Amino acid sequence: MSKRFYITTAIDYVNGQPHLGHAYEKVVADVIARSRQSLGHEVFFLTGLDEHGQKVQQAAIAEGKTPQQYCDDLAVDWKRFVQTLGLSNNDFIRTSEQRHKAAVQAILGKLHREGHFYKAQYRGFYSTRQETFLTEKDRRPDGTFDPIYEPVNELIEENYYFKMAAHQQWLIDYIEKNPTFIQPDYRRNEVLGFLKNETLEDLCITRPVARLSWGIPVPFDEAYVTYVWFDALVNYFSVPIAHGDPVAVSAFPELGVRPIGPELWPADIHLIGKDILKFHAVYWPIMLKAMGAPLPKQLLVHGWWQKDGQKISKSTGNIIDPIAVIAEWGLDAFRYYVTRELDIGPDGNWTDAGFAARYNAELANGLGNLLNRSVSMLKRYRNGIVPKRSDELGPELAGYVGEVRQLLSENELQRALQAIWKIVNRANQYVDQTAPFKLAKDPAQAARLDEVLYNLVESCRLIAICLWPFLPQTAEKIFAQLGLKEEPNRLSAAQWGGLKEGHQTSDPVALFPRKDQPKAK
Ligand code: MSP
């Protein structure tokens, strides 16, 4: 068996509301996963939920539920969200699952035995109201803490720490020697800058059970649980172990898992937002090195969305509800806007007007109109039967398909969509230039009309295949209208000439009905 292309997303906090940022990241990961599948790879796409921690425990208590019950209830919504987004994920990890806890405990045990942890006393100020440690930076100029933190108590707490500093130079060297490990480059430089200028502090990996019980019990000290990052990051590795991936399993023979599953580790891409870069680019590689496991091939870091130039925030009401947008405009319109509008890396800005403009111009008028004209004219003038092959647009479009293929293999999603729209625009221009509706009126032009119609429907077929990673439902609808039974999920099928003479196409149906008046928000 060959190694699968293994891509992961960040696992979302179970107690948050699914919002645009979550939806964006998951859709981008899905487009990459489907692109690789279309390029001929076997893919494993993982997403899931981060469920432990104090906030979850408190919220559960407030609702009169056990933390597990509380998480189980919320997980139903998150799993529905994954379906609403049309994700092709192969697994969905919840950190409260036994398969995950077993892996975390095995890792903790091994690193403890090998001397990576120590226990130390922490003395500091703690805000019970905010459940957070305060530092000198949190003091106001007069030396007091803001009343939002009160009551603030001095707290002495013993915890386990993971020794970090010993690995600092190794990590710098690794990132310098592997320029594609962190992408885009400016994120890589950010991490290198940080590593070169600051001494890494040791990572606190536990909480006393007395204060937090909703975590994973530490196998070597029952008075403690581990939670948050040591727990969450391991999801990328606990799933390969659970599936019997030979590389992951071989690092932890004590788990007794047979190494007969798909080859997954190392991950090819961890897709994450810019806010959690340090955890993935510093702590996770060091954890893996200590575990004796290879590092993931790439951390692909995306930017953050704003709406109307302002931070997305529930408290100010500046939010986008992806579920509502999808209900109003359709899933593929949402997937199109987020991947076309924002490249992977920089921050983006959502505007309702921008969304409606792209919908109308690019989806309804551009793509929708092309398909509709092509399928309708073939039906009207040739009873929907594909005429003899003609290669008039073939060489030019093969160039664009080549561009799409190349860009998809480089995760250049936005540019790939631009390349696909070169095909859409060229084919629409071809309609205007050849004027098939005029040709149809002149029986002497029958052969020319055949050529034009062939070029149009064949262009639509290529477009559907190129589009499938982004807009799977739309690609399938195009294939259905072209009377094609197979799935449009193989780029190798995007060779000119796939539609055969005499093939019967189906009826035209509008892909993206025009919406002249976007609903005021
Ligand atoms: N649970 C941690 C991640 C653990 S990964 C081992 C977490 N969860 S989160 O729910 O807060 O965020 C999940 C992902 O959503 C992160 O990658 C984060 O960057 C992303 N986004 C959250 N808000 C966002 C925007 N406004 N825009 C784009 N993505 C954003 O962090």
Image (spheres, rainbow, N blue to C red):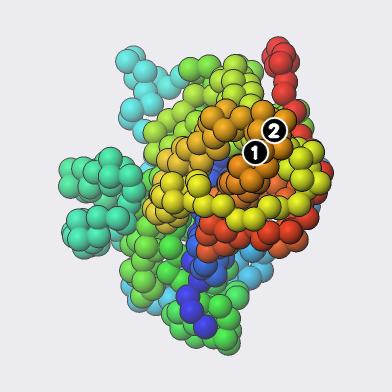
| Dot 2: element | loop
Name the residue located 64 percent from the left edge and 63 percent from the top edge. Answer: 90
Q: CA distance from mark 2 to mark 1?
A: 6 Å
Q: Which residue is mark 2?
A: 442
Q: Position of residue 442 (x, y in %)?
A: 69, 33
The quarter of the displayed image where residue 456 is located: top right
Q: Position of residue 250 (x, y in %)?
A: 46, 83
Q: Position of residue 113 (x, y in %)?
A: 39, 77
Q: Position of residue 452 (x, y in %)?
A: 61, 42
The quarter of the displayed image where residue 364 is located: top right
Name the residue located 72 percent from the left edge and 13 percent from the top edge. Answer: 517
Identity of the amino acid at label 2?
Asp
> Is residue 57 visible to the viewer in this orientation of the structure?
no
Identity of the amino acid at label 1?
Gln
Mark 2 touching mark 1, by CB under 8 A? yes
Name the residue located 64 percent from the left edge and 23 percent from the top edge. Answer: 360
Name the residue located 39 percent from the left edge and 33 percent from the top edge. Answer: 346
> Is residue 495 visible to the viewer in this orientation of the structure?
yes
Disc 1 C-beta below 8 A from ligand 1: no
Q: Which residue reaches farthest front? A: 444
Residue 444 vs 279, above or below: the answer is above
Q: Is residue 176 left or right of residue 148?
A: left
Please give the count of numbered marks on the rendered protein: 2
Instruction: Please tell me which residue lies in front, 3 or 459.
Output: 459
| Dot 1: element | helix
Instruction: Please tell me which residue lies in front, 503 or 422.
Output: 503
Q: Which mark is residue 38?
A: none
Q: Which mark is residue 445?
A: 1
Instruction: Please tell me which residue lies in front, 450 or 156.
Output: 450
Disc 2 C-beta below 8 A from ligand 1: no
